[in-house]
């Protein structure tokens, strides 16, 4: 009975949070079009989210490309399909690995950062202070961050893709003596707009989800400083879940369109 | 109350009610703040003091009653009225609430650049920032980040941030909480000096008796969601009511 | 303020780099699909596109020159394929060039392969329709192959039967292969032919020598060549000729006698009278046969006697006593 009640509680909590998140997203869309625009803060957030994540994303992407090629190379050679390696790695990275790995890393770094930052601002009344200072904190904190993640994640993904392909090429050039131009030629011959466009479009959604969930968790942070930790943690967990759902839906939708 | 009647009321609260779910916090609270006076509100933790002053600036919506600030009804206030109220009513938050990501200068400039009604668009805010910092004695801290400041300094910077808009009313939410007695004393003296310098009216929420004794022109004891007792520090201190005595004996 | 300006510059660099990378990627993909540059639409009509898709490559002389822009099903056997081809490549195409849908490798993508036209053909212009070539699909190819295979199997079975018969010695070929005596005969024949040819060559050699020796006087022919002797011999020969003419008459008479005897004998054989009966009678016939044999031997003796008479006459002609008589005889003969 208790178990049942706790299940019921969990389900209703989940539904309630989903509803609140939907309202939060709705508020974002209302506020984003309304003046005044916090342009300076948007640039600052873009810098924080874009430039400051670049190194982490690039290093991860490079290693992913390196390891992915190293791992698949022996099997491909066994099958005599060594020549297909650039195509396979290219398609995998551009379609899936690049976007999802970058998004997950950003969920960890940016999502949790936003959750913790806004959460602590909420707890230390900085948000209230902002409001009495004649600033709409939702606009200033939430809209700018969601916009920044939405715009920056795709760029980070593009860069991560590029660096991952560089890592892959490095392995190929060392082990297979493949030239840079040949490698990238092979990659782009196998790629299609149907690979690049949907995977780029979905990164905007990834960015939006990372910003939205992070801000939502932080903005609704409760229970003092402990709540900040909870906000940061749940921001990462829930963002990751949302990312996979978006990824799944995007595959379905892009299959329908392309 | 009779002694204050001649003075102009800047804030007037009538029958203020606030619930959090089933939990009643304010149950018909009445208050009048007169021009140039310092009103200390004392109450136990969770008695609704902070909620009450947050209702005053619209941070927390109230469920019932009327709030009138400088002739403007909060419930009927449009964006302009809200902007006016928030410019004229300064708020010093409990934990200072300095923006962590900004320097002291940016913290002070923030309200100045937001509330353009009073000073217009300012190209160079530095003189105003320095003036506010001079008032609190921290001109050297202009380019520091909040994390580099001590608790007392943060409180002063927060006060400077409140002062920069030259408000008519300042609301202090537990200004001495978390500070050692010496720093508390310094802050209270600073508040007093500001009060005299700018002729501001202020509501000070505290449970620091020393603070109340030093600064209060008048006191209200908030018990069970209503103003249980009202009077000068001496009057209340002399009261034999055990509920009132409970505040002063701790 | 300085700090934020610096940040904005860095952000700008970041954003521009990202956008440039993305644009480069888009451009590279577009370039590979021939979306940029001057393209011309050329059409071709197929009855089956074999899974050709929009965006597939178009090849001319093995070079990727464009992509399939649009595939439109007009009716159940008419599919119009619009190809977007580089202007530079179209310049070299002729209107009788044929478009064929082939696969890029055995399991690869489908491509449109434009085959060379004749040099006499007109230049392909924008919007032209190229004739199509129905392509032999891999499965069709495999079908044909399987029929060929079946035929091959039948043939092999037949061959197997024949070889078995041969090895068992049946039929002419089998007999030839199996009978060793024929082989030996053939061998013997060949060796005899070889021997004969050897002998022939020896004979020829001898003949050669003989002919060479004819010119020498001390041989018979050499002697004949001497003219004095020749005249003498001529005379002698003429005498002998006269004698032999007379002898010939004798012989002719003898021959007619023999003929008469012969006809008498055959009359006796064929007649159904007493004589026939006689011949039928074994004893009688034996007697008759003996008589005939005796008659035969008589005739042979007569014949040899004739020959001896002839020889004697010949010899007489050369005798000096009778020479004149012979000559007279010959003269009279000439007069007659």
Image (spheres, coloured by chain):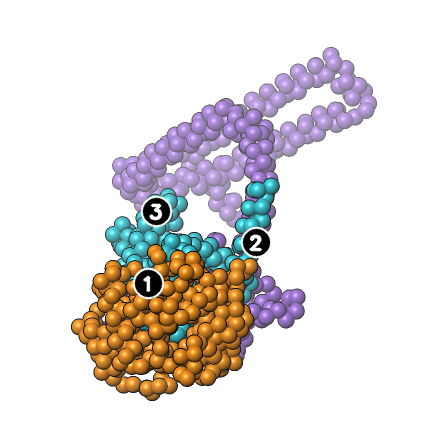
Picture quadrant of residue C250: top right
In which quadrant is the N terminus of chain C drawn?
bottom left
CA separation in Å, label 3 and label 1: 71 Å
In the rendering, at what x and y percent does residue C228 appear?
A: 31, 44
Kindly indicate which chain is depicted in cyan in the rendered structure: A
Whichever of callouts 3 and 2 sits on the residue coming sooner in the sequence is 2
In the rendering, at what x and y percent does residue C259 appear?
A: 66, 31
Helix, strand or loop at mark 3: helix
Helix, strand or loop at mark 1: helix
Nearest-to-viewer mark from 2 and 1: 1
For the residue pair C105 and A247, the one nearer the viewer reads as A247
Where residue A71 is drawn, which disc sits there?
Answer: 3
Where residue A12 is drawn, which disc sits there?
Answer: 2
Helix, strand or loop at mark 2: helix
Q: Residue at x 53, y 59 (%)?
A: B23
| Residue at mark 2: chain | A
For the residue pair C192 and C76, the one nearer the viewer reads as C76
Where residue B209 is drawn, which disc sits there?
Answer: 1
Q: Are marks 3 and 2 on the same chain?
A: yes
Q: Residue at x 28, y 57 (%)?
A: A59
């Amino acid at each position: 009975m208790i178990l049942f009640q706790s299940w019921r509680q969990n389900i209703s909590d989940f539904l309630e949070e989903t509803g609140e998140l939907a309202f939060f997203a709705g508020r974002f869309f209302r506020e984003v079009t309304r003046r005044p625009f916090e342009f300076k803060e948007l640039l600052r957030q873009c810098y924080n989210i874009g430039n400051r994540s670049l190194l982490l994303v690039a290093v991860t992407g490079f290693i992913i490309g390196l390891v992915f090629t190293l791992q698949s190379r022996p099997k491909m050679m066994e099958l005599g399909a060594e020549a297909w390696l650039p195509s396979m790695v290219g398609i995998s990275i551009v379609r899936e690995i690049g976007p999802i790995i970058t998004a997950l890393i950003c969920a960890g770094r940016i999502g949790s950062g936003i959750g913790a930052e806004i959460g602590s601002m909420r707890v230390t009344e900085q948000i209230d202070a902002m409001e009495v200072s004649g600033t709409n904190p939702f606009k200033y904190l939430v809209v700018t961050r969601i916009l920044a993640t939405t715009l920056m994640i795709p760029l980070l993904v593009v860069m991560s893709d590029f660096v991952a392909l560089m890592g892959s090429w490095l392995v190929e050039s060392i082990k297979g003596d493949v030239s840079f131009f040949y490698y990238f030629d092979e990659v782009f011959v196998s790629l299609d707009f149907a690979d690049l466009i949907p995977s780029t479009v979905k990164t905007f959604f990834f960015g939006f989800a990372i910003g939205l969930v992070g801000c939502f968790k932080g903005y609704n942070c409760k229970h003092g400083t402990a709540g900040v930790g909870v906000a940061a943690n749940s921001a990462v967990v829930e963002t990751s879940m949302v990312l996979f759902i978006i990824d799944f839906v995007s595959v379905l939708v892009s299959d329908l369109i392309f | 109350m009779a002694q204050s009647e001649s003075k102009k009321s800047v804030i007037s609260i009538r029958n203020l009610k606030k619930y959090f779910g089933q939990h009643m916090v304010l149950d018909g609270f009445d208050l009048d703040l007169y021009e140039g006076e310092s009103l200390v509100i004392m109450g136990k933790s969770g008695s609704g003091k902070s909620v009450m002053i947050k209702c005053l600036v619209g941070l927390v919506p109230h469920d019932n009653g009327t709030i009138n600030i400088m002739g403007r009804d909060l419930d009927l206030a449009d964006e302009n009225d809200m902007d006016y109220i928030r410019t004229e009513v300064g708020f010093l938050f409990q934990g200072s609430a300095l923006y962590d990501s900004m320097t002291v200068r940016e913290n002070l400039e923030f309200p100045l650049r937001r509330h353009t009604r009073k000073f217009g668009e300012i190209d160079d805010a530095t003189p105003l920032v320095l003036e506010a910092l001079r008032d609190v004695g921290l001109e050297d801290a202009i380019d520091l980040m909040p994390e580099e400041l001590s608790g007392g300094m943060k409180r002063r910077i927060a006060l400077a941030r409140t002062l920069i808009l030259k408000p008519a009313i300042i609301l202090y939410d537990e200004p001495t909480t978390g500070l050692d007695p010496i720093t508390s004393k310094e802050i209270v003296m600073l508040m007093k000096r500001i009060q005299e310098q700018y002729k501001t009216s202020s509501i000070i929420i505290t449970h620091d008796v020393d603070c109340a004794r030093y600064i209060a022109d008048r006191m209200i004891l908030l018990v069970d969601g209503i103003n249980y007792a009202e009077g000068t520090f001496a009057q209340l201190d002399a009261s034999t009511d055990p509920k009132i005595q409970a505040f002063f004996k701790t | 303020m300085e700090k934020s300006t610096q940040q904005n510059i860095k952000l700008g660099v970041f954003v521009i780099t990202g956008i440039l990378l993305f644009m480069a990627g888009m451009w590279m993909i577009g370039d590979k699909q021939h979306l940029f540059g001057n393209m011309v639409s050329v059409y071709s009509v197929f009855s089956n596109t074999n899974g050709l898709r929009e965006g597939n490559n178009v090849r001319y002389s093995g070079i990727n020159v464009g992509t399939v822009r649009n595939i439109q099903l007009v009716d159940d056997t008419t599919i119009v394929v619009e190809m977007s081809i580089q202007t530079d490549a179209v310049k070299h195409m002729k209107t009788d060039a044929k478009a064929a849908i082939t696969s890029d490798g055995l399991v690869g993508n489908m491509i449109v392969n434009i085959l060379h036209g004749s040099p006499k053909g007109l230049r392909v212009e924008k919007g032209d329709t190229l004739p199509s070539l129905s392509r032999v699909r891999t499965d069709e190819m495999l079908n044909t192959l399987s029929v060929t295979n079946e035929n091959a199997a039948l043939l092999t079975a037949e061959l197997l039967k024949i070889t078995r018969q041969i090895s068992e010695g049946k039929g002419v070929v089998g007999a030839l292969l199996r009978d060793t005596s024929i082989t030996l005969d053939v061998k013997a024949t060949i060796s005899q032919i070889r021997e004969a040819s050897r002998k022939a060559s020896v004979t020829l050699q001898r003949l050669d020598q003989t002919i060479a020796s004819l010119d020498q006087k001390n041989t018979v022919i050499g002697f004949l060549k001497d003219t004095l002797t020749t005249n003498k011999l001529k005379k002698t020969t003429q005498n002998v000729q006269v004698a032999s003419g007379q002898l010939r008459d004798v012989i002719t008479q003898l021959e007619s006698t023999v003929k008469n005897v012969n006809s008498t004998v055959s009359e006796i054989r064929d007649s159904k009278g007493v004589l026939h009966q006689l011949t039928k009678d074994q004893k009688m016939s034996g007697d008759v046969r003996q008589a005939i044999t005796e008659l035969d031997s008589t005739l042979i003796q007569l014949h040899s006697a004739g020959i001896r008479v002839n020889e004697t006459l010949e010899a007489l002609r050369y005798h000096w006593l009778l020479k004149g008589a012979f000559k007279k005889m010959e003269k009279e003969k000439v007069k007659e």
